Each structure stands twice: as structure tokens, then as C-alpha cells.
Image: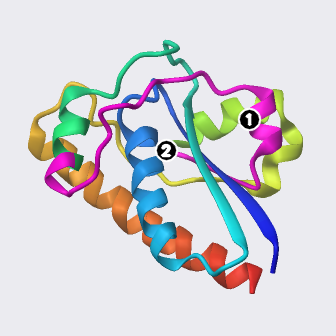
Amino acid sequence: MDKSLTILFVCTGNTCRSSMAEVLAKKRLEQLTPRGLKVEVISAGTNAFEGCPASTQAVRVLKDMGIDLSGHQARQVTRELVEKADYIFTMTKEQMDYVLSFSPEAAGKTISLDIPDPFGGSLDIYRCCAKDLETAVEKIAADILHNIQ
């Protein structure tokens, strides 16, 4: 099986939720992806400042989970990224609406995860967010891999 997939996670600033989801999904898919399947996982924000690092709390929480987010650089979601993606997961319905506003044809591949923004919150709030994302990523990985087999 020689196939490739691109998964895009979208949040507001691409410094908390979508960046954490990206690295969590990469880690999980590394463990599960069958030989011959190439999966690219990327993230972006609806209102991102290009090149911004991930939030300090996000980096810390993921470091505690054994995952390095320190090299992350935020990027703005674009029509090109949306068109490239096979699956798009937004953190809110508003972000999904934003994606669909400039790319209505992405409706069939875009899902809102409904994960609250931890921005400005305590480490405990970020830990809860990371746990919610980990649960979502687990289901996403299982569903995607089931659908391609």
C-alpha cells in the first residue's frame, strides 16, 4: 500500500491546541501507521502570528508527557493548506466555519472537535486540554486508519 494522507489541525493562534494536537497525532500515528502509508500532520491558526512559538504552558505540559513542542512555529491557515489536507480538525465550530468560508468544498473533510481554548490559563487547564486532545487524537487515528484499510 503506497498512500499518503495529510491531517490539518486548526485553532485560533496555532500556539496551544492545534500545535499540541499536531505533535500528539504525530506521536500516535508513528506507532500505528502501517508500512507504505505516509501521514503528514500539520497545524495552523485562523488568526496566527507567523513564526510565533508555542505557548510556554503548552511546551511544558507536553514536555511532561515526553513530547517536544519547543521548535513549533505558528502559521496562518490558508486555502492551500486546506486543499492539501485529507482531514481537517478544528477546535471550535467557529474555526470550522472560518475554514469553510474560503473553502466550502472542504465541508466533507472538516470536523469540529469542540475543545476549549486554554490560552492564558493555568498549567492544570493546559493539562486538561492536552488530555482532551490526546483522547481526540486516539479516536482520530483509529478512525482514519480503519477507513484506509
Residue at 65% across, 73% down? 144
Query: Which is more N-terminal, label 1 or label 2?
Result: 1
Structural distance between the alpha carbons of marks 2 and 1: 16 Å
Nearer to the camera, 49 or 108 = 49
Q: Is residue 69 magenta?
A: yes
Residue to which mark 2 is pinned: 91
Q: Residue furthest right?
A: 105
Residue 85 drawn at (x, y percent)? 75, 48
Residue highlighted by disc 1 = 81
2 or 1: mark nearer the eye: 1
Q: Quadrant of the C terminus?
A: bottom right
Q: Residue at x 81, y 81 (%)?
A: 1
Q: Residues within 10 Å of mark 1 (few under 14, many from 20)?
A: some
Q: Splitting the image into 4 quarters, where does residue 59 fall?
A: top left
What's drawn in magenta, residue-wise?
A: 63-90
Q: Secondary structure at mark 2?
A: loop
